[in-house]
Image (spheres, rainbow, N blue to C red):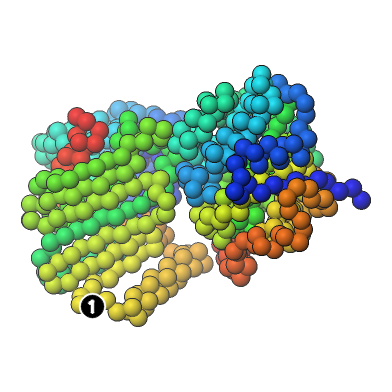
């Protein structure tokens, strides 16, 4: 049994993290920490943590000395400080993406974690989505051949939705576009094509009325020689999410919301296209209906988190197992983000 | 039976300002006004060419006519935050602030203004908070766009005031949307409705994701229900089939009986029929009910 604490209890934690944690019998989450007392009390009340609710990481670590790990799901710009405190106290950490907003902070955390012998896992949950898992397996089996191009296309909606916390309204200040939204797809790009060597072309649109960067287009070259195309937009006219991997043997196309995975080769047959779209809709409808009408141990939405948390817990229970997404794993993504950040937001 | 007056003018081949001037003349606006509030329709980050939001050129035409008629009046362009938007940045994004500046009008983000409680005998509630500005002004114009709506079939004058609910997150109100629309219309009573039916939206993905449709009409009246009933007929719907319209009429907010004045006779309206799939609408209604029923279980 491992004992953990929740740091930050926003909507995603309540709706996605908690069902995933509850599905892991070896975990006992029995403390909560959040600076917003109203939200913290409501969360503590719901999960019977009233007597172990804290307003700061310092109090949490001081009063709960036998914690095995903390799961940090606060705004990205707070991650560095919170991770540092936990690592210095010798507590394992599972931190939501982004690890930090700066490369030097990530390297500092890596060094501290090594010194303390602490495991740090970063919550890049898109790596654990079903089509991405299938695509990775296909790549590892050599079905794709050598990857020479990766395309990321995501056209999303408003940043000012009522369900978003107010700090996400301040896009420019908190670098929301890059570090909270595009990071999912940029991480996948690095996950498949490897580290980025150079940004060949970059255009970012800043909208002064919205005080936000709304579009990023980039053409990048990976160290493997593959090229990557990034087209990430918010406030787009229509919503669209597409991830494509082109290899010397086969191509992979992944769509999100709802999921779709397909390995392509040769000529594209329109009947085949229709059939795969039919499968995509069928899977979505069946999964939605089964999710609503059957009591599932892990809700569909929480499955990627569950897969990540499960492996993180396994690594805590068995010291020889690595964490599923370590700091070393995400450094190439951090480096890519750093390259984009300095050119989009300035240093 | 008393008939409400609904005025319609064509704006095709004619300058928008002239058409708007003729409509204002037909409506018979008061001779004097010191404080004028105009509720626009800025419901999403979608530019005017999508038909989903107020067209700055039409707003400009309305302001020009009002400014000429009331040279010393204070004119306020008003909108509230919606679930997806912050109005403070929509003014610039949609180009409304430039038009407002040209005619010495002020853009008002209602969420930042004072609100006042109004008692009503509503279908769902007995009192609602409404913007104090609407109570204080001596001329309040509701200025909606004419669009289809995937859930209520049409959105026009009555539905435009749904944006006057104070809360930003209006999703919970969509569970009883028809009643919520009627209640807010009991609390907020515009003196005139002026519908921008120049560039409209059709299809089941309205009000924001539908297809733009050029209609080239300005429609106005004092009775919101009558104006909406006419607009529903123009779009090809039977007004009794529109839930919020039927409920508003029954709640005494207005009448379906109207008398047309202006450029359009009742015989011409068939030409304007909007695309809208009834089967898709009914199917989606069943799916929505099924999902909300399963959520409630």
**Residue at disc 1, secondary structure:** loop
Quarter occupied by residue A88: top left
Q: Is residue B282 visible?
A: yes
Residue A61 place in picture, x, y as percent: 29, 32
Please give the name of the residue rendered at 28% of the width and 51% of the height, measured from the top-left corner. A231
> In the displayed structure, does residue B36 sit left or right of residue A4?
right
Q: For this rendering, which residue is in front, A183 or B95?
A: B95
Against B140, is B82 above or below? below
> In the displayed structure, does residue B257 sit left or right of residue B193?
right
Q: For this rendering, which residue is in front, A44 or B54?
A: B54
Residue A87 place in picture, x, y as percent: 20, 35
Q: For this rendering, which residue is in front, B26 or B227?
A: B26
Q: Which residue is mark 1?
A: A267
Residue B268 place in picture, x, y as percent: 72, 60
Q: Is residue A71 visible?
A: no
Badge 1 crowding class, 10 Å Cα cut-off, few under 14, some 14 to 19, many 20 or more, is few
Please give the name of the residue rendered at 62% of the width and 61% of the height, measured from the top-left corner. B274
Please give the name of the residue rendered at 19% of the width and 34% of the height, measured from the top-left corner. A342
> In the displayed structure, does residue B57 sit left or right of residue A178?
right
């Amino acid at each position: 049994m491992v004992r953990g604490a929740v740091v930050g209890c926003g909507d995603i934690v309540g709706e996605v993290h908690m069902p995933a944690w509850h599905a892991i019998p070896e975990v006992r989450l029995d403390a909560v920490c959040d600076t917003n007392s109203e939200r913290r009390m409501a969360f503590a009340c719901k999960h019977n943590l009233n007597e172990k609710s804290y307003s700061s990481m310092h109090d949490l670590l001081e009063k709960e000395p036998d914690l095995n790990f903390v799961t940090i799901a606060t705004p990205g710009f707070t991650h560095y400080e919170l991770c540092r405190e936990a690592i210095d106290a010798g507590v394992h950490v599972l931190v939501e993406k982004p690890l930090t907003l700066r490369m030097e902070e990530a390297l500092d955390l890596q060094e501290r974690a090594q010194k303390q012998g602490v495991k740090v896992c970063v919550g890049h949950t898109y790596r654990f989505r079903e089509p991405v898992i299938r695509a990775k397996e296909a790549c590892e089996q050599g079905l794709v051949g050598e990857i020479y191009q990766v395309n990321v296309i995501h056209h999303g909606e408003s940043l000012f939705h009522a369900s978003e916390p107010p700090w996400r309204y301040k896009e420019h200040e908190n670098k929301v576009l890059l570090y909270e939204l595009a990071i999912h797809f940029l991480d996948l790009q690095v996950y498949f094509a490897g580290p980025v060597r150079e940004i060949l072309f970059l255009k970012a649109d800043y909208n002064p009325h919205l005080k936000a960067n709304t579009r990023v287009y980039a053409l990048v070259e990976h160290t493997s020689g593959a090229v990557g195309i990034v087209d990430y937009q918010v406030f787009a006219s229509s919503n669209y999410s597409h991830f494509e991997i082109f290899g010397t043997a086969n191509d992979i196309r992944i769509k999100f919301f709802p999921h779709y995975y397909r390995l392509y080769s040769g000529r594209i047959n329109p009947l085949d296209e229709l059939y795969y779209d039919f499968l995509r809709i069928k899977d979505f409808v069946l999964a939605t209906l089964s999710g609503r009408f059957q009591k599932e141990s892990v809700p569909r939405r929480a499955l990627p988190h569950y897969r990540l948390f499960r492996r993180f817990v396994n690594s805590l229970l068995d010291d020889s197992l690595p964490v599923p997404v370590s700091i070393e794993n995400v450094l190439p993504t951090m480096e890519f983000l750093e390259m984009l950040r300095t050119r989009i937001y300035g240093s | 039976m008393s008939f409400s007056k609904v005025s319609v003018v064509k704006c095709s081949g004619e300058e928008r300002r002239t058409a708007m001037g003729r409509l204002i003349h037909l409506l018979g606006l008061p001779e004097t006004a010191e404080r004028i509030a105009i509720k626009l329709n800025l419901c999403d980050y979608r530019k005017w060419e999508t038909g989903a939001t107020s067209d700055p050129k039409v707003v400009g035409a309305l302001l020009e006519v009002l400014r000429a008629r009331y040279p010393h009046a204070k004119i306020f362009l008003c909108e509230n935050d919606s679930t997806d938007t912050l109005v403070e940045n929509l003014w610039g994004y949609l180009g409304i602030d430039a038009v407002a500046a040209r005619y010495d009008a002020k853009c008002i983000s209602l969420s930042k203004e004072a609100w006042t409680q109004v008692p009503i005998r509503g279908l769902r509630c007995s009192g609602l908070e409404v913007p104090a500005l609407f109570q204080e002004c001596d001329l309040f114009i509701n200025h909606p766009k004419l669009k289809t709506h995937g859930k209520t079939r049409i959105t026009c004058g009555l539905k435009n005031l749904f944006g006057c609910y104070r809360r930003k997150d209006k999703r919970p109100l969509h569970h009883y949307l028809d009643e919520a629309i009627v209640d807010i219309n009991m609390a907020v009573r515009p003196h005139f409705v002026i519908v921008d039916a120049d560039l409209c939206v059709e299809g089941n993905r309205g009000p924001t994701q539908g297809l733009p449709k050029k209609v080239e009409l300005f429609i106005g009246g004092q009775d919101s229900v009558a104006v909406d009933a006419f607009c529903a007929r123009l779009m090809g719907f039977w007004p009794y089939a529109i839930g919020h319209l039927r409920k508003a009429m029954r709640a005494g907010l207005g009448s379906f009986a109207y008398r047309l004045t202006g450029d359009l006779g009742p015989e011409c309206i068939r030409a304007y029929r909007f695309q809208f799939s009834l089967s898709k609408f009914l199917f989606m209604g069943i799916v929505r009910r099924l999902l909300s029923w399963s959520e409630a279980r």
